[in-house]
Amino acid sequence: MENWADGLNEVAITVTDENGIFIDMNTHSKRVNLKDVNKTAVGQDIKGCHNERSNKIIQHIIDSKTPNVYTITKKGQKKLIYQTPWFKDDGSFGGLVEISLVIPEQMPHYDRDAQKKA
């Protein structure tokens, strides 16, 4: 079966287990983070890939079980970074997921709540 996540050309998805070990990366994540889609970080510790400040944020996400969401500009592209815990079927902490996607500088915003009231 094809890996649907590898077909997301502008969305990087990176996943760790509960110990912070990379367990999955889609092709765009490899392209962005490793520069070579034939390599992988699977099996490596997330902490080895980040500085002290980032590792503190990662630890906060793990401890609080809450997402960390922000935008960046990198290589002229605006990106949304969504880092969040994921949970196993039994409800226990499974690890972390980071989704990084390119967003336009200007884009429409639709207020679905306001549409319901109209």
Image (cartoon, helix red, strand yellow):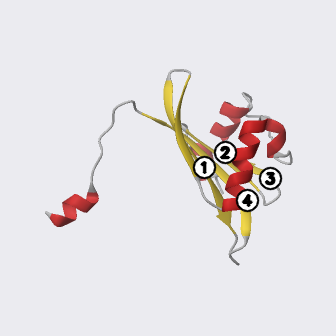
Q: Earlier in the sequence, mark 3 or mark 1?
A: 1
Q: Are marks 2 and 1 in contact (CB under 8 Å)?
A: yes
Label 4 and label 1: CA atoms lie apart by 18 Å
**Amino acid type at image mark 1:** Ala
Coordinates of residue 23 in the picture (x, y in percent):
78, 53
Q: Are marks 2 and 3 in contact (CB under 8 Å)?
A: no
> Which is more toward the observer, 87 or 9?
87
Q: Which residue matches tag 4? A: 95
**Amino acid type at image mark 3:** Gly
Q: Which residue matches tag 2? A: 26
Q: Are marks 2 and 4 in contact (CB under 8 Å)?
A: no
Point 76% across, 43% down: residue = 55
Q: Which mark is residue 5?
A: 1
Q: Which mark is residue 14?
A: none
Q: Which residue matches tag 3? A: 20
Q: Earlier in the sequence, mark 2 or mark 3?
A: 3
Label 4 and label 3: CA atoms lie apart by 7 Å
Q: Secondary structure at mark 1?
A: helix
